[in-house]
Structure formats: C-alpha cells, structure tokens
Image (tube, coloured by chain):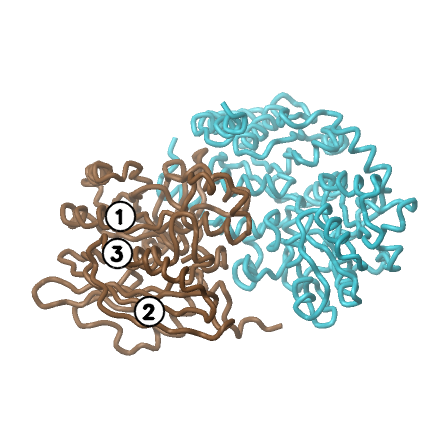
Amino acid sequence: MDRDKFVKLAHGSGGVEMHKLIESLIISRVEKKKVEGGLGIDYPDDGALIPMGNGEFLVISTDTYTVSPPFFPGGNIGTLAAAGSINDVLMMGGVPLAALDAIVVEEGFPIEDLSRIVDSMLFVFREEGVAVIGGDFKVMPKGSVDKVIINTTVLGIARKPIVDVPREGDKVIVSGHVGDHGAVILLLQMGVGERVEELEKGLLKSDARPLTRLMVPLVEKYGDHIRAARDPTRGGLAGVLNEWAKAAGKVIVVDEGKIPIRRPVKDYAEMLGVDPLYLASEGAAVLSVDAAAAEEVVEYMRGLGFEDARIIGEVRGSERYKGYVLLRSTVGGYRVLEPPTGDLVPRIC
Amino acid sequence: MDPRLLVEAVFRENPQLALQLRSYIAKLLEKLGEKWGSRARLKIMDFCGTHEWTITHYGLRTLMPKGLELVAGPGCPVCVTPSWELEEAMKLSFKGVTVYTYGDSYRLRTVSPVNGAYSLAEARALGGSVKVVTSIYDAIADARKYGKEAVFLGIGFETVAPGYAHALLAGLMPENLSLMSLVRLTPPAMFYSLSILREKPPEPPVMGVIAPGHVSTITGAKAWVPVAEAFEIPVVVAGFEPIDVMMAVALILRQLLQGRAEVEIEYKRAVSFDGDLRAQAAIHKAFEVSDAAWRGIGFLPRSGLRVREKYSEHDARTRYGIREMRVEEWKKDTPPGCKCAEVVLGKAKPTDCPLFLRKCTPSTPYGPCMVSMEGTCAIWARFGEGGVTEDMVRELGLLEG
C-alpha cells in the first residue's frame, strides 16, 4: 500500500510532516511572499506584518478551528476560535482591533449548540474590544464535514512588532502551565472524559483564553527586550522551541523541572504515553527575552496575574550544533527534545 | 504523603541524589581503573526496554563517566516476535478468524506479504478481521459478545504470562477464543546476547547487567543467578525510575571493585529473590517450555512457552493446525538493511543503522525495533538520541565538574 500519495492526519499536526508538506505544496510556490518591508509567508511566525508607512504595522493572522469535540471543559470551539487568533496577533506584538469569522456547519447540527458556540466567540471578541467586521457562513450536507469548523482572521496594530529571532544568551520564559488544552482534548478523544475526576471537578480544563491582559502591557513596557513570543498550540512547547532553535541556528537549553505542568496533565499524559511538552496550550505564552531584563519581565508578568510565569531555560550558541533543543531532565541528565512528529492528537484546535 | 508522590520525589525528581550518584559512579570507575591497572572501559547492558526508556528519557548517558557505556539489550517483546508467527496470524485474519492484538504488534511489519498486507493493520485495511485490545481480558470480554472464532496474539515476556495462564486455568476463555502463545523467556536471551558480545573483543566488555524489574517480580531475582555465575559478572535487578538505574550502575561497579559477581536487588520495593511463586506455578501448569525463534536472531533453546496439551482446545496452534516453524526453516526475518537484530543483541546502536530516522521513523517504522515504545530504535528516535547529545553537552559545558 502506498500511503505517501495521500494526505495523512500527521500532515495537520503542526509537526515535521506538516512543515514539509506546506513548504513544498504552498510556500515554495508562492511568488510574492510578503508586502515590501513586512513579514510574510516564508517566515515561521504567528502572523504577517504589513508596514503602514507611519512606523506602525498592520498585523494579520488567520486560523481554522476544527477541534473535536466542539464542546470541552473550559470552553468550546467558539472560545478557541476567538482567543486563538487574538493570541496570534498578540504574539506578533500587536493590539487586536478587528476580526472576521467564517463558519462551516454540518446539516443537522443543532441551532442551539451553534448559538452557544457563537455566543462564546462573540463574548471573547467583545471582552477584548475586538470589532467583528465581517465573515462568512456555509452549510455542508450531512457527513461532508464533522459538525462545525470555524475560521477567524484577526487584525491588529503593532508599534513594536515581535518577529521571532531568539538571540544567544536570551532567557526562555513561559507565562504559566503548559499542555492543559491538549490534555483535555486528548482525554475526551480517548473517550475517557467522563471517568476523569479532575475534569468533572474542574481541576483540569482547557486554558483557552485571550492573553491581551498579559501581552499588551508587556509589549508596551518591555517590547524592546522581547526577541520572540509564541503561544504553544499544536506541537506544544517542544514545537515552539524547535522552530526557534532552527530559525535562529541556536541551541535552546531548557530545564524540565522548571516547566510548570499541572499534576493531572502530567499524570494522564504519563498514563497515555504522551509527553506533555508536546501538548497544546491555548492560553499560555512562551517568550525569549534579553537576559538582562528577564527577571524583571517575570516579576512584571506575575504582577499582571500570571503567577506561574518563570524562566525555564536559555538560548545558547554553538559552533557545531545548530537548531537543537536540549532538555535537562529532573535528574540533571540531558536529551535532545525532538520536534513534534506524527499525529499525536489530531484536531486539537 | 501519597506513597506514589514519595516514590517520585525520591526516585525521579531528585537532582541532588542524582548528582551524588553521578560522582560516586565516576569515583568507582576511577578506582576500578586503579585496580585493573589501566583506565577502566566497560559496558553495562540494560536488558529491558523500559530501562532503555528511562536511560534515554532522563539523559542518563550524559551523566555517565567516560569509559562507561550503557548498551540496550533484547528486552522488547514486539521486536523479537518472528515474522513467521505474525504472518500466520494474518492468514487467520483473512480466513474470518478475528485476531486480537496489542496496539504495537498491530503495526509490526512482516518480511513477506499475506494477501498484499505487511502488517495486521494493513490486513485489516484489506479486509482481514483484526481488533486492537489492551489485554487478554479485553479480548475475552469482546470474544464473549462476538461469539465467532477468534484468536488472541499472546506476545510478551514472563510479565504477561501469569495473566495468560490464569485465563486458561480459571476457564475464562470462551469456547470461541484461543491463545496463540508467543511468550518468550528472558534469561535465554540474556545468555545469548552476553555470549555474542564476548565474541567481540575490540569492544569494551559487558561487565554487568541491569536485569529487568517487572519480569523479576514474577521470576524472582533467582532467575539471573545462572547469568551471574556463567559470565562472572554482577547482575542487578533494578526499578524503572532514573535513580533506580543510577543506583544499579553504582551497585554493579561496587561489586566489580569488591571482586564479586552476584545477583543483587536494587528494586527491593517490588522484587524478591524467589519472586511470585503462585504465578510461577500457574505458568508451569498452563505452559510448557519450548525452543523458540526470536526475530532476526534465530532459535534459542528453551526460550518460549507453549500451551500444554490439557488446554489444547484453547491453543490456536492445534485448533487451526498452525504449523510451528522448524529450526532448519528459520531465515533472518528482519527487512533488508535493517539492523534491528544487532540492536536487540547490543551489537549495534540505532545510530549505526543507515535506515535510522531516514527510511525508518516512528510514524513509518520499517524495522521491528522502531515499532514499540520498548524498542531501542523507537526510544532513541523519540527522545532525540541521535548520537550527538553527549558531545553537544560537552561543547556547551553544561555538565562541568
């Protein structure tokens, strides 16, 4: 059986397979890859930049949400669709202003459920002061699409855009616990959601939320010291760090014991043979920050209500080795933290 | 404190103790060098796939002093399941007999196709009847409801054998379900790999074995006494947390320094010298020991378990007339270019194989060692052991002192 000729789920998991496919299928075939003076499709980041001529940039990011199941502890596909694209604009250093949404729904889907989803989406946009300026709505015949998928495009303005280029000596900071969203969806997809006490009791839920309250003041105050910012969604923390190491040609060294992971996330991931460092977060940020400012940045983040923010590692330079992430284990040994591969959890966001 | 958390705090998340053990191990090796009158160079074999997982996942190789190498042994049941047996199971699946299998053996590839399929997964895609289960008890429950002819593919080492034996002895198997026993016994494989490695003189010798912890809960540490005696090397039964493995390395070196070659138990919280006598009796009652083939390696005497005649109505081999492979029929059953057999025996590292992470990856495994998370290649691939970690750590000066 020749399976290489067909699209696989792994091609959509944000890992090695996906990057390879979109590089050959799309990026390499796009002629004009960016607007002059901006940032375009050829650079791996959260969104694109278009210079506005006054020193500021228009930030645009688009994402399609296919999460299965569409309702989960901590939110639903609507929460995710709004928060996810807002976060992408924030990670580019932008202040989100306006959004477009496109909903594709399966014939027979309950209007009541759809209404709850749209409510959640609009609630997030409203809370964040993001105008919903347009969109699209389509219905597919039963069986042609699984329940509902949503695309959102968010636009924002950046005065200090963050184009991810971690530098040697930078400290790597996370804003809080990682892997919550991925763990929740994984458990639901495995069909054990109802049997997991922590989900019932609300001790474990998706962290899907916009990070405006963190990122806007942080970029305003420390923008010049932040060399990279990303929300670790598909592919998790391991995915972000590997992309950075590769793009910057550096070795990123992180300390496993310092990475905040909730107890149930750790436990269930271990039971299911999954590394939480590859599980998606939908309400966490990873930053690469000038070492001189790093401690202060962490303090400031904590002051903004992100009490679990901390330094988890640093960016190193090596003559011989480029593009690696090294993980210091809980006993002090080192291993290479591989980029994500395969279809760990399909349809996570 | 929750005992599980205590175990974790002591044996897993304990950088202080790890640091002490690291310098203790280095000191012991240095003393061994003084004793032997040259710089000590030796290998310690970790037999069990789960130990290899711990070693790689926690980066323990980077904590070992120069001259001390940890090599992985044959401890992966999926890796050593012969292609022949798998092909027989696939044939059954096409004849309408449902085959129950574990998730990793479901993806294990054969060398020859059966009706165009190279694995149970492909057999299912092409119309074979195959179901993935997590235990024989799952298969029993499903077969009861299902009611038609079905076979459970009983892969594993001594650890799973008591469960299979219990299913047979307690009469749990429904009339329509039978067991295809592919159980392999670990001591013969350890004997074989150690004797093979002794024949490789330019390499530093294997001077100690980290013996499997789970297997030993059943067999007892006594199962390894013949190994320690025959090869005159220390054998330490170890637990699966990183501190357990470091302790085992230290105990092996201490024995060497004291001139001892004994079986010692590090994993005292689970393993006794005699093991689980009831489980041993059940295994003996349900199975007889037979010569058995190991994938890529060949026949090892008295290394398999065959269902006793008394329970033959639940023995898939008699029920479906599956012919057992004869010794002279065996031919190397790893795919062309694959070094899995050498990796299993500790003769090669995954990184010595030209297919590793090229043609053979965790998402598209080519050789048997890349399939299961107990396979050395799969572990190395997943945890970044591409052969550069130690050098990178040195260059960056991450483990000075």
Can I make out residue B380 in this image? yes
- What residue is drawn where x is 79% and y is 39%? B166
Please give the residue where the numbered disc 3 appears in the rendered image: A164
- What residue is drawn where x is 80% and y is 41%? B165
Label 3 to label 1, Cα distance in Å?
A: 8 Å
The chain whose colour is cyan is B
The chain whose colour is brown is A
- Sequence-first disc among 2 and 1: 2
Please give the residue where the numbered disc 2 appears in the rendered image: A102
Residue extending farthest to the front is: A112
Label 2 to label 1, Cα distance in Å?
A: 33 Å
Can I make out residue B29 in this image? no
- Sequence-first disc among 3 and 1: 3
Against A111, residue B37 (above or below) is: above
Helix, strand, or loop for circle 2?
strand
Residue extending farthest to the left is: A54
- What residue type is disc 2 on? Ala
Against B207, residue A170 (above or below) is: below
Same-chain check, marks 3 and 1: yes
